[in-house]
Amino acid sequence: MRYFMILVFLAGCIESFDYEPGVSDRVLVIDGGVTNRKDIQSVRVGYTSQYGISPFSPVRGVSITLYENGVPLDLEFTETENGEYQFDGSLVNAAPGKEYFLSLTLRDGKTYRSKPEIMPKPVVPDSAYFKINYVRIAQEGGLATSRNVLSVYVNTPVELECKPAFLRWRVHEIYSFTELKQFYWSVPHSCYMWLEPTYQEIKIFSGGELRGGILKDEVVFTRDEFPDIEFRYRHYFNVSQYSLTRSAHEYWSHLKIVANPTGSFIDIPPAAVIGNMYNVSDPKEIVLGYFEVAAEEIIRVLTVPALLVPHYTRDPCREWKPFCYDCLLLPNSSYDVPDYW
């Protein structure tokens, strides 16, 4: 029998489970959360791959209910093709001090729940900015290359009513592009593109690690590629700062320690962290993922070509390309202007 170690961090304890390959390799993952934001929020449900060979397998037809202070909310979850179930945050009226948990029922009748958590108060960051540094990056064989690396920094309080706050950061990007004038009578459009979310290093912090209650110049995001199309016009880094519960912070801390090199929740890492989801009828079943109850604040960082020195952005339309005259050809493009633009 082959064994697979599962780390369970509950009340400071670590437990191991016998893990035999086969059907049991497909472990259920339930991941998502609820925040105080009034935008679209989501929960993802699926099974892990088997040792990275088969792809993530979404679970379809899941019945989901969100509970607020023990009362089920009349909320519709819209299912997408990739196993994501979305709901309208404006219909929840989530707020700090309220308790939330999630209940899911699969087609086979199995019911899963998250452990109830009370939403913390939000922590509003003081400021955020970016800076480009010229750094040397080690390569295989002892060689090194030099390149420009853009880092996003945050300055923020890390206390809530004289108690340490538990914070996590996630950065989303959006950029604009304006078409060229093709004919005398044509009217060029501007498009707005959300970049596909990619794995980011887990960025968390406990206010208990700092005296004075103020965190300065904390790096929350880096990237070392600057495609001309993404930085030719306006580009925003939208920094989400989440105020977490203590248990959520512990979960992310342990996940950061054992996360596999790709940082994926889909492939089981060498040791999988158990979150707050459980099978109501069979608490011993291994379930991965976490339903996070957090207060979110967003701070935005604007970049334009003139601010990217020493990096130089060239005109992506110096050679003819179809998207130069129809920006809707760009991935994830829309004419819809973000309200903060």
Image: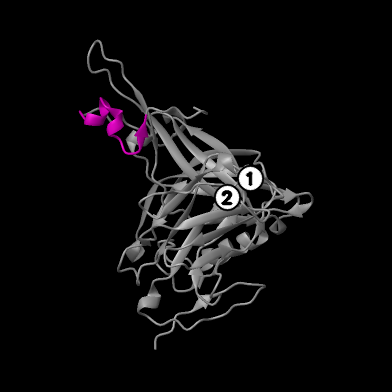
- Residue 245 drawn above or below residue 307: below
At 51% from the left and 39% from the top, the residue drawn is 238
Mark closest to the chain's N terminus, 1 or 2: 2
Q: Which segment did they paint magenta?
A: 320-334
As rendered, which of 308 and 289 lies closer to the eye?
Answer: 289
The reply to whether the C-beta atoms of the residues labelled 1 and 2 are less than 8 Å apart is yes
- Residue 5 drawn above or below residue 301: below
Q: Which residue is mark 2?
A: 34
Q: Is residue 268 left or right of residue 166?
A: left
Q: Which residue is mark 1?
A: 94
The amino acid type found where label 2 is placed reads: Val
The amino acid type found where label 1 is placed reads: Ala
Residue 313 location in percent, x, y?
35, 33
Residue 47 location in percent, x, y?
40, 65
Image quadrant containing the N terminus: bottom left
Q: Is residue 34 left or right of residue 43?
A: right
Structural crowding at the residue carrying mark 1, measured as other residues with C-alpha within 10 Å and reported as few (<14), some (14–19) or many (≥20): many
Q: Quadrant of residue 235?
A: top left
As rendered, which of 244 and 38 lies closer to the eye?
Answer: 38
Residue 301 location in percent, x, y?
53, 36
